[in-house]
Image (cartoon, rainbow, N blue to C red):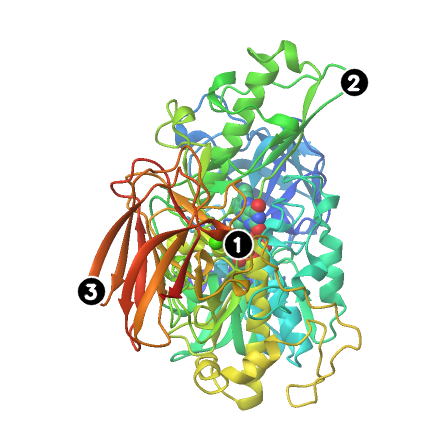
């Protein structure tokens, strides 16, 4: 019965059965004129659709408008899908109020005033004597009212569906759109997500002769590094094993002077221009991937929603790359993954404010977080920076809208304290200039590859045969900042970063290629923050230039898959040398197809000079010299401070009594007696009893070194004694912080034949 009435509705909406009931759905995001409303695509998986939001920073935004033709005249009941966005916290007031204007007249109902959940708020009945009608959304507050869609039905028994399925088929049915996805073409590589990782993957693959679709659900490229979120790109490029990696990233990366800086500094247009210049790339902006077709362990196609028209499109591909940050494609296809539900990195909505020439009011915001000036760090230089971060213990996918809205309540609550409470005198002329409505997320889902990279791999510099992308950022993990967490302990909104500085920041640790493809979906790559690493390892690899270089490698590997008709795993197992050859080529190298000859640009950027040691070059010293750059570290070590005279490019030091251990390993060229020396730079905060163990043929010998005292031997060495070593075994010197009475210092070990 239900089925039959559905068919009648379809027919009548199409105008074939004019005597039957008509139901019409108008997606708010499809309004041709958005006025001041913005299209929010962040929560489609949670609430079912893109929506329009009135993000006016407290000033009502201009009306969004549309015109449409009803299937027939008559009396229609009207609903608006919306919510009261602060109701889930029972906060006083209803900031998200707006009206629906029908042919210029507001309906008597104020929308956005009820319900913590997305639902159809009833708007009453309207009689239409003309089929051509006009609708407009009129914002009443400027504080983030939201409208998903409008439903009109002349069927008196019609009940709107209570359904948050993404792009549910009733939406297309009542919008008069085809149910089936439209064919968008066949591609060698379909890239989902146009952040740094996806953009670089698309450019790299296209230049290597692949036909690429780049699908990005926002109007701009760059992800967190776009003008919408304004995170500046960090991580060092062009170094380590493959110093050409990073050349593509450098073509489009920002030169921002601040994070968050101005919109222009993030150069969205340059990113787009670099992509548009590639004939092999078709760029699909405002397109959100939400479905997948597969056959066993192979992905066949991605289905994506045109976020403005509501149409579905089907992208057929041989290979796919998930660069969505949220691992959307991987999860949909059944790729193995992990989700860390608590104690993860959070979401930030950065913001900017400025001081005007004259006084500027800011309305009271009783529904925002109730903050006073000492409940948050003062937003210096007009910037609310990265640490306006929340959601550490919220689900990184299901609670995304929760986190974004909590961030908005925090920012507006803080600005209210500045404008209307204790901060008032000092901020009469202050005005909010920009608040990101797109949340910047850092940690959502890790897709699992053949290698799951860990902190120890990186810190101990574990060599992998497929190491390629240099990661240079410290292991940077975030926690709620306790002093600001007291008022809202359930949802702290200010973070602190803890840096573990054991990463080789100069040369970078080479992240293995096997972190960049799925271990169970045989034609799926990944790059960026959703790759195969642990939480701690994400602490370093997540920065954008590093993720962009992963994209560069994925693009090259994709071309090898095509050339040899093989899987990403086969590239590791059979064509690793070929991948390395491609990684050594300048980023601007091209080939017309994957079988065509390589065209190496005549004037590639000069290779970066090898990083010269700032200190004493170990190669100039006699005997074996093992610098800290080659040593293995466990526990927490800080990198180089200000003491001069070190060997190589620095030294490390660790806090007394911690679990830190530094291990300098070596082998000797022939059996015999050797003098073992240890270098340090003296300082009064160093240990007088640094515990050192020499692993030698006689066993483990304990020595204590006074690292406050100046070393007596040349180049800052002290002698640990004479020991016996034999060939064919790995010997070592270990420095430990446990039991030390000051910082322990690890610079270099020297092994010399004893006279
Ligand atoms: C506030 C903040 C400060 C940070 N500080 C720094 C810093 O100083 N420097 C630095 O380099 N990094 C920093 N990071 C980390 C860094 O921004 C991220 O780890 C990085 O952006 C990850 O890049 P990505 O390309 O993997 O993903 P993203 O930048 O998240 O890009 C993914 C893109 O895919 C799109 N997308 C998602 N789902 C779909 C879909 N279904 N269909 C189509 N498109 C989709 C998204 O809209 C997005 O544009 C910071 C992050 C935050 C939030
Ligand atoms: Ca919608
Ligand atoms: Ca050193």
Q: Which quarter of the figure is the N terminus placed in?
A: bottom left
Q: Position of residue 237 (x, y in %)?
A: 61, 60
Q: CA distance from mark 2 to mark 3?
A: 78 Å
Depth check, mark 2 against mark 3: the one in front is: 3
Q: Is residue 21 visible?
A: no
Q: Position of residue 145 (x, y in %)?
A: 57, 34
Q: Is residue 393 visible?
A: yes
Left or right: residue 732 versus residue 623 is left
Residue 357's disc number: 2
**Quick one: SS at disc 3?**
loop
Q: Which quarter of the figure is the C terminus placed in?
A: bottom left
Q: Is residue 248 above or below residue 686?
A: below
Query: Which quarter of the picture shows residue 489?
Result: top left
Residue 279's disc number: none
**Quick one: SS at disc 2?**
loop
**Residue labelled with disc 1:** 505
Residue at image position (47%, 24%) is 369
Q: Is mark 3 within 8 Å of ligand 3?
A: no
Residue at image position (40%, 70%) is 449
Q: Is residue 170 above or below residue 303?
A: above
Q: CA distance from mark 3 to mark 1?
A: 37 Å
Q: CA distance from mark 1 to mark 2?
A: 44 Å
**Residue labelled with disc 3:** 698
């Amino acid at each position: 019965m239900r089925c039959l009435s559905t068919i009648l509705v379809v027919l009548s909406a199409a105008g074939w059965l004019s005597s039957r009931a008509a139901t019409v759905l108008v997606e708010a995001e499809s309004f041709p004129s958005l006025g001041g409303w913005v299209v929010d695509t962040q929560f489609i998986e949670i609430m079912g659709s893109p929506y329009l939001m009135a993000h006016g920073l407290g000033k009502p935004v201009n009306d969004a408008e549309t015109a449409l033709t009803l299937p027939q005249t008559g009396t229609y009941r009207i609903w608006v899908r919306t919510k009261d966005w602060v109701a889930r916290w029972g906060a006083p007031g209803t900031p998200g109020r707006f009206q629906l204007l029908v042919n210029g007249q507001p309906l008597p109902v104020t929308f956005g005033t009820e319900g913590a959940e997305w639902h159809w708020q009833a708007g009453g009945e309207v009689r239409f004597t003309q089929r051509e009608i006009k609708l407009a959304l009129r914002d009443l507050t400027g504080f983030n009212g939201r409208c998903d869609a409008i439903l009109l039905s002349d069927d008196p028994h019609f009940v709107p569906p209570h359904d948050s399925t993404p792009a549910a088929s009733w939406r297309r049915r009542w919008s008069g759109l085809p149910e089936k996805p439209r064919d968008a073409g066949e591609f060698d590589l379909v890239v989902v997500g146009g952040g740094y990782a996806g953009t670089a993957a698309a450019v790299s693959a296209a230049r290597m002769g692949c036909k690429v679709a780049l699908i990005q659900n926002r109007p701009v490229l760059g992800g967190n590094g776009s003008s919408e979120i304004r995170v500046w790109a960090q991580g060092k490029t062009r170094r380590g094993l493959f110093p050409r990696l990073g050349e593509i990233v450098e073509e489009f990366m920002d030169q921002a002077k601040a994070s968050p800086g101005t919109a222009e500094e993030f150069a969205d247009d340059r990113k787009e221009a670099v992509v548009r210049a590639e004939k092999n790339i078709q760029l699909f902006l405002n397109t959100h991937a939400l479905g997948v077709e597969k056959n066993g362990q192979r992905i066949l196609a991605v289905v994506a929603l045109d976020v403005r028209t509501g149409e579905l499109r089907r992208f057929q591909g041989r290979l796919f790359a998930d660069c969505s940050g949220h691992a959307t494609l991987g999860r949909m296809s059944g790729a193995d993954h992990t989700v860390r539900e608590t104690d993860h990195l959070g979401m930030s909505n950065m913001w900017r404010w400025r001081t005007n020439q004259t006084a500027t009011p800011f309305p009271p915001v009783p529904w925002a977080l109730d903050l006073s000036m000492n409940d948050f760090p003062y937003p210096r230089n007009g910037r609310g920076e990265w640490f306006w971060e929340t959601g550490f213990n919220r689900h990184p996918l299901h609670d995304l809208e929760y986190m974004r809205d909590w961030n908005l309540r925090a920012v507006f609550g803080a600005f209210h304290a500045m404008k209307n409470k204790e901060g008032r005198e000092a901020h009469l002329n202050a005005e909010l200039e920009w608040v990101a409505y797109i949340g910047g997320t850092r940690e959502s889902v890790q897709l699992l590859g053949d290698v799951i990279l860990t902190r120890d791999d990186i810190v101990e510099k574990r060599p992998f045969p497929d190491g390629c992308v240099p990661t240079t950022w410290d292991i940077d993990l975030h926690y709620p900042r306790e002093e600001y967490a007291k008022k809202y302990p359930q949802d702290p909104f200010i973070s602190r970063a803890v840096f573990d500085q054991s990463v080789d920041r100069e040369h970078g640790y080479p992240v293995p290629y096997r972190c960049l493809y799925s271990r169970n979906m045989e034609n799926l790559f990944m790059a960026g923050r959703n790759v195969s690493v642990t939480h701690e390892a994400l602490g370093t690899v997540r920065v954008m230039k590093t993720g962009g270089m992963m994209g560069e490698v994925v693009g090259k590997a994709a071309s090898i898959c095509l050339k040899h008709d093989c899987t990403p795993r086969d590239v590791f197992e059979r064509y690793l040398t070929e991948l390395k050859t491609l990684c050594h080529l300048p980023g601007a190298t091209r080939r017309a197809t994957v079988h065509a000859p390589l065209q190496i640009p005549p004037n590639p950027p000069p290779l970066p000079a090898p990083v010269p040691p700032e200190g004493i070059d170990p190669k100039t010293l006699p005997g074996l010299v093992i610098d800290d750059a080659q040593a293995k570290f466990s526990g927490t070590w800080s990198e180089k401070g200000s003491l001069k005279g070190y060997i190589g490019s620095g030294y490390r030091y660790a806090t007394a009594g911690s679990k830190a251990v530094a291990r300098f390993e070596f082998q000797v060229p022939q059996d015999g007696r050797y003098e073992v020396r240890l270098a340090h730079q003296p300082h009064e905060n160093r240990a007088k009893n640094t515990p050192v163990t020499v692993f030698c043929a006689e066993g483990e010998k304990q020595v204590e070194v006074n690292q406050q005292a100046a070393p007596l031997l040349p180049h800052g060495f002290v002698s640990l004694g004479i020991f016996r070593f034999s060939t064919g075994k790995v010997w070592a010197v270990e420095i430990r912080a446990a039991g030390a009475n000051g910082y322990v210092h690890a610079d270099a070990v020297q092994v010399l034949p004893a006279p």
